[in-house]
């Protein structure tokens, strides 16, 4: 059995459902195919079940891509306030958190809204039916699909990335792009915890649960935010964003006291004749157990001495250790724990205003399958809405 639609979308996630709604409400026939039923599993678990669906600061500098200007056009056409207003009209309740992050009260409401909006616009759903191949001929595309093939004039591939396979992440879109001869930027897990270095300058074991604000430098980027020690390594918002820019084998440098100078602080205490030991004094600035680990950077015979008996040059050792703590993580927790994958289809193949493939008219890509990856904070879903909107509108015009 074969059915015909003007616009077929593979992937009923954030981007695909948005594109289908945009196209169908412009009067063209649209179908959305997803192997999952219900679909949009990543949206459902996003933001810890609260879905951080956009960010007030959404702009190109929060995205990583081999082609950094590519995302500008689609982002400019869908400012964060437009997303908030349209979701609000759909009954979504939301709240603003730190750094411009906008969270829904419930991610499940967002999924219902996305599916409802696409359906109301007139889209047809083929859920629980995986697409497994695509052929192109003079009339358009033929999507081989479990339970019946689909013909279409325009095809959008919005199948996301290999991140989080437990929520349906896979490389279908990448494989399809390769089949059509398109360039691909190699993928890697991103927004993912780091594993400890085998040789860290400080003993970070058994600190699980400790969290503090830090500044992390890697690959020429500086990321400020919270760091969380876990059993296996480092997590927390600053670490997850740093993992976007980090490449395997590279060094990271952590400033554990971004707003203080420990050397100045200890010198002042010493001048006031403070008789505390280093670990106890440092615990005024950071969690006690972590302070003790950094105090262990001092020679053994100095650790138990009061501050008044320590030479100032030892305070410089601590300053260096605390503010320039450099090491190479042994790796990350991988795709299983990654929120996204960086890399993807090379955007130099894609028209930035329409998401259409330059060499293959009628073939569109949107969302995370493209080589556009956002920092933590609602930027990835914002990209899914912006690129899906651009693709759906353009396909309806074709
Ligand atoms: C745990 C977690 C938390 C996250 N939290 C946030 C957050 O709070 N804010 C934020 O901005 N981002 C967050 N993200 C990232 C965000 O969810 C993704 O970037 C976004 O969903 C990507 O949208 P997309 O439409 O490109 O792909 P997806 O939303 O992943 O949708 C792809 C769809 O394609 C379907 N599919 C795949 N292959 C096939 C096939 N062969 N046939 C048919 N269908 C197929 C999948 O089942 C899926 O429904 C989170 C991700 C994870 C894993």
Image (cartoon, grey):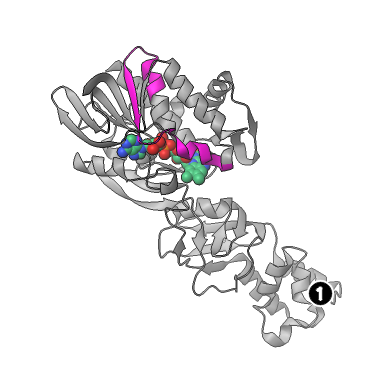
Which residue lies at the image location 82% right of the left edge and 75% below the top edge? 276
Which residue lies at the image location 78% right of the left edge and 83% below the top edge? 305
Callout 1: 10 Å neighbours few (<14), some, many (20+)? some
Left or right position of 317 against 111:
right
Which residue lies at the image location 55% right of the left edge and 32% below the top edge? 108
Q: Nearer the viewer, residue 82 or 40?
A: 40
Q: Position of residue 163 (x, y in %)?
A: 41, 48
Q: Does dot 1 land on a helix, a strand or a loop?
A: helix
Q: Which range is magenta?
A: 20-48
Q: Position of residue 368 (x, y in %)?
A: 39, 40
Decide whether residue 12 is among the magenta residues.
no
Which residue lies at the image location 79% right of the left edge and 83% below the top edge? 309
Quadrant housing residue 76: top left
Q: Is residue 209 above or below residue 23?
A: below
For disc 1, the marked residue is 270
Quadrant housing residue 298: bottom right
Q: Position of residue 321 (x, y in %)?
A: 61, 71
**Quadrant of the drawing holding the N terminus:** top left
């Amino acid at each position: 059995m074969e059915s015909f639609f003007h616009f077929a979308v593979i992937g009923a996630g954030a981007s695909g459902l948005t594109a289908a709604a945009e196209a169908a409400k412009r009067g063209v026939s649209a179908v959305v195919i997803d192997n999952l039923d219900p679909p949009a599993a990543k949206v459902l678990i996003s933001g810890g079940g609260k879905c951080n669906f956009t960010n007030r600061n959404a702009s190109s500098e929060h995205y990583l891509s081999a082609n950094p200007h590519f995302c500008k056009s689609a982002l400019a056409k869908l400012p964060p306030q437009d997303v908030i207003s349209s979701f609000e009209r759909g009954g979504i309740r939301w709240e603003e958190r730190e750094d411009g992050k906008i969270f829904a009260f419930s991610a499940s409401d967002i999924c219902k809204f996305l599916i409802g909006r696409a359906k109301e616009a007139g889209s047809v759903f083929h859920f629980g039916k995986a697409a497994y191949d695509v052929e192109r001929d003079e009339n358009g595309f033929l999507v081989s699909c479990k339970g019946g093939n689909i013909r279409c004039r325009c095809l959008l591939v919005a199948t996301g990335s290999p991140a989080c396979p437990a929520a349906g992440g896979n490389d279908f879109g990448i494989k399809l792009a390769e089949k059509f001869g398109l360039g691909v930027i190699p993928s890697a897990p991103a927004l993912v915890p780091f594993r400890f270095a085998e040789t860290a300058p400080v003993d970070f074991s058994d600190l699980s649960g400790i969290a503090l604000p830090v500044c992390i430098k890697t690959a020429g980027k500086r990321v400020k935010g919270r760091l969380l020690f876990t059993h296996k390594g480092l997590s927390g918002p600053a670490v997850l964003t740093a993992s976007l820019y980090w490449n395997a084998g590279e060094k990271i440098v952590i400033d554990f006291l971004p707003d203080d100078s420990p050397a100045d602080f200890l010198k002042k205490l010493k001048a006031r004749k403070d008789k505390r030991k280093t670990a106890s004094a440092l615990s005024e600035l950071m969690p006690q157990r972590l302070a003790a680990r950094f105090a262990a950077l001092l020679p053994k015979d100095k650790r138990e001495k009061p501050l008044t008996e320590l030479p100032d040059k030892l305070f410089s050792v601590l300053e260096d250790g605390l503010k320039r703590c450099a090491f190479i993580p042994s790796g990350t927790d991988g795709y299983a724990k990654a929120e996204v994958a960086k890399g993807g289809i090379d955007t130099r193949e894609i028209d930035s205003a329409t998401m259409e493939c330059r060499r293959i008219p009628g073939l569109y890509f949107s969302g995370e399958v493209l080589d556009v990856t956002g920092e933590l904070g609602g930027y990835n879903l914002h990209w899914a809405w912006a690129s899906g909107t651009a693709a759906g509108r353009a396909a309806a015009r074709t």
